[in-house]
Image: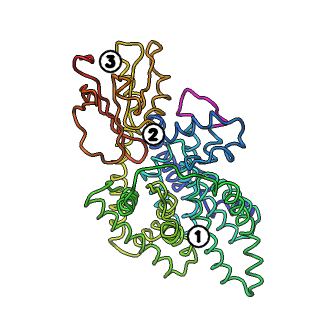
Amino acid sequence: MTSEQSETSQYGPSQKGFLRDPLNMVFATIVVFAAAFRLPGLFTDFWLDEIWTLSRTNLLNSPVEIFTEFLSSNNNHLNTLIFYLLGEQKQWMLYRLHSLAAGIGTVIIAWLIAYQKGRLEAIIASLLTAGSYLMIHYSSEARGYAMVIFFALLTFYAAQRFLQNSFWRWAVIMWLCMWLGFLSHLMYVHVFIALGFWLLVSLFKTCKTGQEISIRFIQCFGVPILSFVFFYIFIFRHMKIDEADEYNLFVVLVKTISYAAGGPASGPSAITVAALTACFQLYSLIWMWRKKCDEWVFYSFVIIISPVAILIINQPEVLFVRYFLISIAFAYIAISFALADIFRRFYTGKKFLVLLILLFLFGNGWNVVELFKYGRGGYLEGLRYVAAHSTEHNIRITSNNDFRNNMLIEYYKHFLPIDKKIVYVSQDNFPKEPAMWIILNRIGYPEEIYKTMIDAEGDIYKLVKSLPYSDLSGMDWYVYKKQGPKGEE
């Protein structure tokens, strides 16, 4: 067997007699499972952030302007570049294919990373990643999140391989993944920080002198440091944070951790699930430390220390569940190590593992069903309803948020019958300029939605259509139609 063949079989499914090895069949089944549960999400409605990226991309004259003109935090540069290369597409599903590929690839890399600890670890890590609602959700939308997770895991895998055998091809792969990771999303910085500290700890143990440590560190991490400085000076420091709704840190953290474990978004149950999950995550990191595994440094930084430090130092203006996706992806791998150990050491560990996996898959499956049912909103359905229930050619619509709703309307109006034309009335001009329809958008858990509304002119609007979204990406739409003598019944 050649060194290349030995290297492959040691860290992943065997290339020889694929169907004869039961482990290979398990691996293939998990990958197919991951793909099957990510595909339906591709067909949900295009939502605001995706449309925003597309609309801005259409204004660019060259790929260079992705980095010089589109300075919004909505710009995930690599994702925007893919939009630019694809051009105008009638099927918005095509803009999401790279996220699907990255999502499936993430499951494969999770297997490869965990396989270095054992077969059971690989099965658990890949199954958690494949069945995670958060991983499924963000693998089916045209943003940079699926790609940054993929490049984060691949970076770590390449770094592991480089430290194990010093093959420079792994260093080059690591550098390339770092560049692509930063271009996918700035939250890749957690991996950058964690790798730096982990590398230093590893070198302190293996190198004999300070000079040797410095040389090895520069060899491995010099290019990434220079790359980060370049990205920061020429790209990141010029980016502008877009406005978003106010957030409650505790609420966001509870939702993030609860969703990661398959729990609900809020309420006492979510707090309970989040607390138990956080405790077990701490246990898995302590377990790695007690096993004298240097990688506990990396996992501790990427899952907890780096995100917490940046929250404290940066105090971000906006915060979403999706900003913790890298931490969650690595948390699944770290937890797989502790679960596999429990499985092997304790008689009841086998039952515990099976029960935990079933609960995880059931809880996440429930949230995935909500995604399939409601998607990222029902914008096209809402406008088709408006068009079908309007007799006039020019359909006048206003809303409670000109930026969000008008952008959605501008995109989806092209899918309406040609005899219907949408005329949007801004909030500044309403009700001086009349509108037959009002659309209210709500994000998260909205306050009470009234059945009727009255405008400043005394016209009554009745709620005729409610279009909820699942969560995380999108918004609810509530469609009101004018009633009474000035409207149509």
SS state under label 3: loop
Mark 1 touching mark 2, by CB under 8 A? Answer: no
Q: Amino acid at mark 2?
A: Gly
Comparing marks 1 and 3, which lies closer to the viewer? 3
Visible residue check, residue 1: no
**Residue at horizontal 38 percent and vertical 42 percent from the top:** 371
Query: Is 482 on the left or on the right of 416, as rendered?
Result: left
Which residue appears at 50% of the width and 80% of the height? 289
What type is the residue that disc 1 sits on? Ala
Q: Residue at x 32, y 61 (%)?
A: 355
Q: Residues within 10 Å of mark 3 (few under 14, many from 20)?
A: few
Residue 441 in which image quadrant = top left
Q: Which residues are magenta?
A: 84-94
Q: Quadrant of the C terminus?
A: top left
Q: Position of residue 183 (x, y in %)?
A: 64, 52
Name the residue carrying label 2.
41
- Left or right, 283 with respect to 327, comes to left
| Numbered badge on residue 194 | 1
Picture disc at residue 389:
3
Query: Closer to us: mark 2 or mark 3?
Result: 3
Q: Is residue 87 magenta?
A: yes
Q: Is residue 484 magenta?
A: no
Answer whether residue 251 is visible to the viewer in this image: yes
- Mark 1, Cα crowd under 10 Å, few <14 / some 14-19 / many 20+, is many
Q: Position of residue 468 (x, y in %)?
A: 33, 38
Sequence-first tag of 2 and 3: 2
Considering the numbered disc 1 on the image, is that residue within a helix, a strand or a loop? helix
Judge depth for marks 1 and 2 and give the one in front: 1
Residue 289 or residue 415, whichever sits in front: 415
Query: Tag 2 or tag 1, which sits nearer the N-term?
Result: 2
